[in-house]
Each structure stands twice: as structure tokens, then as C-alpha cells.
Amino acid sequence: MVAGRLEEEFIAKAKAAGGEIERFSGIAEAFAFISCLAKQLDIKNMAVAPDVSLPSAEINSWPLLKPEKTEDYLGAEAGLVQADYGISSTGTLVHFDRNDAEKIVWTLPHLCLCLLDERRIVQDLSAVAKVLSRHLSQMTLESPQVSLVTGPSRTADIEGQLSLGVHGPSRLVILLFEGKASGSHEKD
């Protein structure tokens, strides 16, 4: 399957799962969108995953949460993460968490903003099986884990009443951007 088809399939599946998609020509444009959205929603505390490289020019205007301990994340109104891969066949985001703090940014705030380089979209999970296995077997990491996120958190009670955001974010916004041809975002 060609790259354009993978992206379109990923977008369709992610939307079908309740995710929102915003497309950008580059990461700088995605960061400008985040800044505007934070102002529009009056976000006062945004948790940022440790592996997200923030633009130094805009950083002073962002409402960043500076957690010192796990409990500090409870005040986060939004979380900003960067997925390692996108799975086109399911619209799933894949993130190789190095520790619990990275996972908390994905799951605790009600709004999850997820950066995804469109070049990191693959057909299915088997396409990243080797790198996933390498990540999970790293003895140098505090707590290697893998987050697989498909849409906002949803659960239903015994009567079938659907609730959003019970076990994770109630809103997932995927910020799909065109990455540069050089460089890598692998953490293994």
C-alpha cells in the first residue's frame, strides 16, 4: 500500500474511532495550532511527554505543567505526546513509553494532543513488531511499556450506556504533520 493510501486509511479509521485529525505541512505549524487551541480552550496546565521537543520560541507562552512527582499530573487539563507510529488498518497510535510519566501524559488529562509524523504510518502492528520487541526488552529503561491508543477512552456499563473519558482522555486530537526527510524519531 502506498504512503498516501496509508495516511488516508489511518485518518478514516482514527475518525471512525472518535479521534479528531488536524493536518499540517510541518511540525512548526502543528505547534502553532496547539498554542492557539490552548488559548481558545483556556488551558492553564498542559503536561508534555518528556520525548516531545518543544519549540523554544513559543515555549514561554505555553501553560506548561512542571510536574515534580506523579501526583502533580492530576492538575493537567491537556497532555501533549508524540506517537512513534500510526497503524493505518485500525487508526491506532503506538507510543514506546520509557516510564510511567510518559504513559500518564497519554491517559490522565481529558484532552490528549498527539503529534504524528505521517511518514511513521504503517499498515499494521506486524510492521513494527521487531522494534516493539526491542523496546520492551531494553534493560536500561526504568519501565518499558507500549501504549496502543485508538480513539478517546470509552467504556459502557452493564446497560450499554457509553461513557467517554473514564479510563483515559475523553478527547483525542491527532496532529498529523509532514516530517522532514532526514532524522529519526526512534527511541530504541
Image: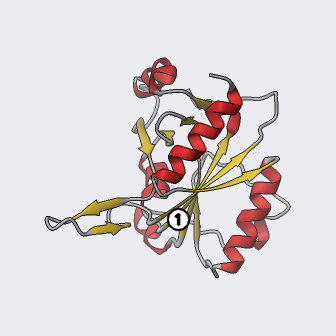
Q: Quadrant of the C terminus?
A: top right
On screen, residue 20 versus residue 34, left or right, reads left
In the rendered image, the residue lying farthest to the left is 158
| Above or below: residue 29 compared with residue 46 | above
On screen, residue 41 versus residue 142, left or right, reads right
Q: Residue at x 49, y 33 (%)?
A: 89
Q: Nearer the viewer, residue 71 or 28?
A: 28
In the rendered image, the residue lying farthest to the top is 130
Q: Nearer the viewer, residue 132 or 137?
A: 132
The percent coordinates of residue 95 (x first, y second) are: 51, 40
| Above or below: residue 111 compared with residue 8 | below
**How many neighbours does mark 1 have within 10 angstroms: few (below 14), some (14-19), or many (20 or more)?**
some
Q: What residue would you read off at disc 1?
A: 67
Q: Residue at x 69, y 71 (%)?
A: 37
Q: Residue at x 61, y 79 (%)?
A: 44
The percent coordinates of residue 85 (x first, y second) are: 57, 35
Q: Residue at x 44, y 47 (%)?
A: 149
Q: Nearer the viewer, residue 14 or 110?
A: 14
Query: Quadrant of the rendered structure where residue 154 is?
Result: bottom left
Q: Quadrant of the N terminus?
A: top right
The percent coordinates of residue 127 (x first, y second) are: 51, 21
| Above or below: residue 41 compared with residue 29 | below
